[in-house]
Amino acid sequence: MQNLVILGGGYGGMKILNELLPNHLPEDVTITLVDRVPYHCLKTEYYALAAGTISDKEVRVTFPEHQSLQVKYGEVTSIDTKEQKVILKDDAPISYDDLVIGLGCEDNYHDVPGAAEYTYSIQSIEKARHTYSVLNNLGPGAVVGIVGAGLSGVELASELSESREDLTIKLFDRGKHILSSFPERLSKYVENWFVRNNVEIINQSNITKVDEKRIYNHDEPIDCDVIVWTAGIQANHIVRQMDGEKDRSGRLVVTPHHHLPNDEHVFIVGDCASLPYAPSAQLAEGQAEQIVEVLRKRWNGEALPETFPPIKLKGVLGSLGKKQGFGLMADHAITGRVARLLKSGILWLYKYHNG
Ligand SMILES: Cc1cc2nc3c(=O)[nH]c(=O)nc-3n(C[C@H](O)[C@H](O)[C@H](O)COP(=O)(O)OP(=O)(O)OC[C@H]3O[C@@H](n4cnc5c(N)ncnc54)[C@H](O)[C@@H]3O)c2cc1C
């Protein structure tokens, strides 16, 4: 028997399971999935979990059941590619024949002093729950600072402002306009939404230091009761510790077949892989499909294509509370209710197909 070990049951890991289990798994291959959480988590909804507008149960999806799948609940602490073993905390190592690393990402604090110690996060389910608890225990009129106005910072600020109108929310962003990777028209639409909903945007900010309940913008102190960091991500620390070429965000460089250049048995999927696109759940899923193709062809003794076609990304959709949204679909900007309905519809479909 050969053992395919998948580290992380996120969007990448889950897609590989859903593609392989019903159709493409040879009888002599077993799969071991390792995750520190005993269910698939819908990370794209962590902003709503933290804001307190959805329940914990709504971001959980059960892992599939199959006679060839073993789900191992545990914390990966390192990977020994020479011995082909995954090392777990308080548990025996797991040997693999093929390995897929899909451990996701962590906050990148860009060496800002105090940011790691004094800010809250929405990058893991445990941290999003903790952030939920501090945000929702705040008294009336408390000040919340959110650092970073990319997609997740914007979604958190808008969701929180809608659910807690009594809070003062300050959204700090480096750029001249928020959502710097989106067309200016969309950024302005979202900025106007924030103006109408009393969220203060502090453009061209430069957070130089964070203390307990205090943020320094261009060295000027601003008191906040809670500070949430959404100003950048990097690959999971397990991946950052591995040997091999990495990009500026600690993601491992992979071949066109998505494995390490010096080890064709170690694949990297999702936020841990260095790819020429912004990391996203969609990208992780697209990459997972191509990894399945490689595995399947190898198991069947078929030749591999030299490269795969570029991964098709349908676009990005963001929410502004429960009623409004914005997005780019096939390079077309969309705003308002339609964008929000589309986002909800995509989430519903995802849960329907995976639940
Ligand atoms: C608020 C927010 C909104 C977003 N919105 C969108 C969106 O609208 N569209 C979009 O495409 N993308 C969106 N993203 C990005 C998207 O969530 C990620 O790109 C995606 O989750 C990456 O998938 P992945 O499989 O690489 O990792 P993940 O989905 O993060 O899964 C990683 C898995 O690894 C497990 N894990 C991590 N470390 C360990 C360990 N040491 N031991 C054991 N298990 C471990 C985790 O428990 C988790 O299950 C959003 C992200 C955030 C934070």
Image (cartoon, rainbow, N blue to C red):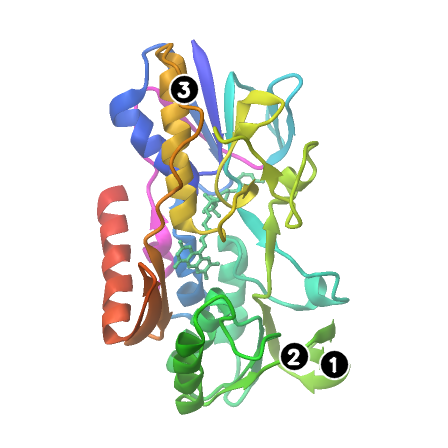
For the N terminus, the quadrant is top left
Three-letter amino acid code of the residue under disc 2: Ser
Residue 68 belongs to magenta span: yes
Q: Is residue 93 visible?
A: no
Label 3 or label 1, whichever lies nearer to me, is 3
Q: Residue at x 27, y 43 (%)?
A: 354
Residue 88 x, y percent position in the rendering: 60, 30
Say which residue label 1 marks: 218
Three-letter amino acid code of the residue under disc 3: Leu
Q: Residue at x 67, y 49 (%)?
A: 248
Compare residues 230 and 224 and report the one nearer the observer: 230
Instruction: Evaluate if marks 2 and 1 touch, with contact meaning CB atoms under 8 Å apart.
Output: yes
Within the image, what quadrant is residue 22 found in? top left
Tell me if residue 203 comes above or below residue 332 in the rendering. below
For the C terminus, the quadrant is top left
Q: Which residues are magenta?
A: 54-75
The answer for how far apart the CA atoms under marks 2 and 3 are is 48 Å
Say which residue label 2 marks: 205
Three-letter amino acid code of the residue under disc 1: His
Label 2 or label 3, whichever lies nearer to me, is 3
Residue 263 belongs to magenta span: no
Tell me if residue 183 comes above or below residue 291 in the rendering. below
Element under label 3?
A: loop
